[in-house]
Image (cartoon, rainbow, N blue to C red):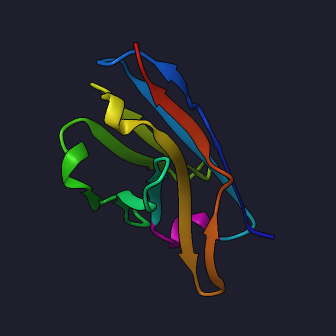
Amino acid sequence: QVQLVESGGGLVQPGGSLRLSCAASGFTFSSYAMSWYRQAPGKERELVATIASSGGSTNYLDSVKGRFTISRDNARNTVYLQMNSLKPEDTAVYYCKTRTIRGDYWGQGTQVTVSS
């Protein structure tokens, strides 16, 4: 079955960096786009970044452009989110997600807290 497992979250000071990873299994990873979403307390889940199946195209939420970078390693079935210059407003649970021909699949999420 499809599994998405996020890791790499934690507590970081403002201005710091974190790298999130999402290990995928149960589907042909290299055939599908992958996305990172986040959900802050009391807010709706929002799309942060998307990367095409080949890795050749990416899109970002305006508020993270220039600070976050999405990438993927199709040989390792893993998608990454490098987050630099983190701000308190980036605090949220971060989820990876894919849409396959069988439906949408989400990971369990990883908490990112930006605080001094």
- Residue drawn at (61%, 41%), measured in percent from left and top? 110
Q: Place residue 24 in its image quadrant.
A: bottom right
The location of residue 100, given as percent across then percent down, is: 58, 80
Relative depth, front residue between 39 and 108: 39
The location of residue 32, given as percent across then percent down, is: 50, 71
Q: How many labels does the image show?
A: 0
Above or below — where is 108 with respect to 105?
above
Relative depth, front residue between 47 and 72: 47
Q: Place residue 18 in its image quadrant.
A: top left
Q: Is residue 110 magenta?
A: no
- Residue drawn at (49%, 29%), measured in percent from left and top? 113
In the displayed structure, does residue 20 sit left or right of residue 25? left
Q: Where's the N terminus, which quadrant?
A: bottom right
Q: Which residue lies furthest to the bottom in this view?
A: 101
Q: Where's the C terminus, which quadrant?
A: top left
The location of residue 115, given as percent across then percent down, is: 42, 20
- Residue drawn at (61%, 53%), measured in percent from left and top? 77
The location of residue 22, given as percent across then percent down, is: 59, 47
Q: Does the magenta stretch include residue 31?
A: yes
Range drawn in magenta: 28-33
